[in-house]
């Protein structure tokens, strides 16, 4: 027993015994004192046992902590938040009948936020059991809407069970063993950053598709967010009039306020009427959810007239400019004559 831990507990002190002569009233007092002595000793023993049991219960029980967190809330899009739970309880106590009192059983984790602008899309997550020294990660999906950049507080609710006692009764050869468990609830405050994240948009489509031929196009993307777009890839999904569509497999990185071009090859049906047609694409990021995008592609005929059209436009414009210059010169000469 550790007597030093009894400072905060009531203590019953028992004085030394005194030799008292037997006779009359003194004899009754001596009997009462003799009865009080074992009662006081029993009270002290109960206090020691209760306090020792409470300390052992606290020392032997599981102790869950958040060892690390990763992820951030990106505005207006689902974000994945990863939380690692660890049982930091000491495993020095010897297992009783193969059971550890420091082990956490049936762990369930739930994430919540008092701010209505944070929507936790994942429900309660089953973590399972954690023995002392073990860790396990749990993931939640959340969305931030209409917020400013900064730090957002969240709350992690943990429920678990622990082995509180083991009772053995009956015959020693065939004993009856009863395990008693205690339900425990914990709340852990957390903080996650709120960022705008990468905001990638299609700025320009360079090139045209020619019916019946393979055509190479360039898609110019710009990042208007506050984080780099890492591992960006374009995955086209062909539909009529495009019979085939392929893209580069090498991922790109676009810094904030930066641009980058992705190359795609399309094959257009031979009987396609010239015009603009949508090509469904998926924009895939390494650290952010993918986005769907419809790219409008211009389909034009590959004919001599098509190539001569820009030259004809230039000729017409040059002639108009030359005519205007000569007209202005003739007008100036007439003014000089009349002067």
Image (cartoon, helix red, strand yellow):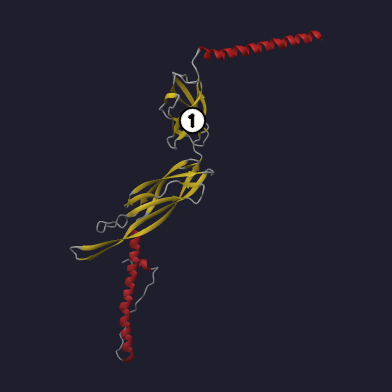
| Residue nearest the observer in this picture, 282 or 289 | 282
* Residue 11 percent coordinates (x, y): 37, 72
The residue that appears at 33% across and 86% down in the rendered structure is: 29
Look at the picture and state if 93 lies above or below 304: below
User: SS of the residue at dot 1?
Assistant: strand
**Quadrant of image for the N terminus:** bottom left
Which residue is at the far top?
Answer: 337
**Quadrant of image for the C terminus:** top right
The residue that appears at 44% across and 32% down in the rendered structure is: 282
Look at the picture and state if 295 lies above or below 54: above
| Residue nearest the observer in this picture, 72 or 278 | 278
| Residue nearest the observer in this picture, 297 or 86 | 297
The residue that appears at 34% across and 50% down in the rendered structure is: 128
Whether residue 17 is visible, yes or no, is no
* Residue 42 percent coordinates (x, y): 31, 74
Which residue is at the far right?
Answer: 339
Give the residue pinned by disc 1: 294
Question: In the figure, residue 140 lies in which quadrant?
Answer: top left
Say how many tags the image has. Answer: 1
* Residue 55 percent coordinates (x, y): 35, 63
Which residue is at the far left?
Answer: 173
Whether residue 27 is visible, yes or no, is yes
């Amino acid at each position: 027993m550790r007597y030093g831990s009894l400072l905060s507990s009531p203590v019953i002190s028992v004085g030394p015994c005194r030799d008292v002569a037997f006779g009359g009233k003194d004899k009754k007092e001596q009997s009462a004192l003799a009865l009080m002595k074992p009662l006081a000793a029993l009270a002290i023993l109960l206090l020691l046992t209760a306090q020792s049991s409470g300390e052992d219960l606290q020392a032997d029980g599981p102790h869950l902590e958040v060892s690390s967190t990763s992820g951030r809330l990106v505005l207006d899009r689902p974000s994945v938040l990863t939380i690692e739970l660890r049982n930091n309880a000491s495993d020095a106590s010897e297992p009783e009948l193969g059971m550890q009192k420091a082990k956490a059983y049936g762990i369930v984790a739930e994430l919540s936020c008092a701010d209505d602008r944070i929507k936790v899309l994942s429900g309660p997550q089953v973590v399972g059991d954690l023995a002392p020294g073990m860790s396990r990660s749990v993931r939640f999906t959340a969305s931030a809407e209409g917020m400013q950049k900064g730090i957002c507080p969240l709350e992690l609710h943990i429920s678990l069970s622990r082995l509180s006692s083991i009772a053995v009764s009956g015959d020693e050869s065939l004993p009856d063993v009863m395990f008693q468990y205690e339900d425990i609830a914990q709340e852990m405050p957390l903080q996650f950053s709120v960022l705008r994240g990468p905001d990638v948009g299609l700025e320009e489509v360079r090139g045209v598709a020619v019916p019946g031929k393979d055509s190479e196009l360039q898609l110019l993307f710009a990042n208007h967010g506050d984080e780099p777009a890492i591992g960006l890839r374009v995955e086209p999904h062909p539909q009529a009039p495009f019979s085939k569509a392929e893209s580069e497999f090498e991922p790109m990185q676009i810094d904030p306020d930066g641009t980058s071009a992705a190359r795609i090859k399309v094959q257009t049906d031979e009987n396609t009427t010239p015009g603009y047609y949508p090509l469904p694409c998926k924009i895939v990021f390494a650290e952010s959810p993918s986005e769907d995008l419809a790219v409008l592609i211009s389909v034009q005929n590959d004919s001599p007239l098509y190539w001569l059209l820009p030259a004809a436009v230039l000729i017409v414009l040059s002639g108009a400019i030359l005519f205007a210059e000569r007209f202005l010169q003739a007008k100036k000469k007439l003014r000089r004559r009349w002067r």
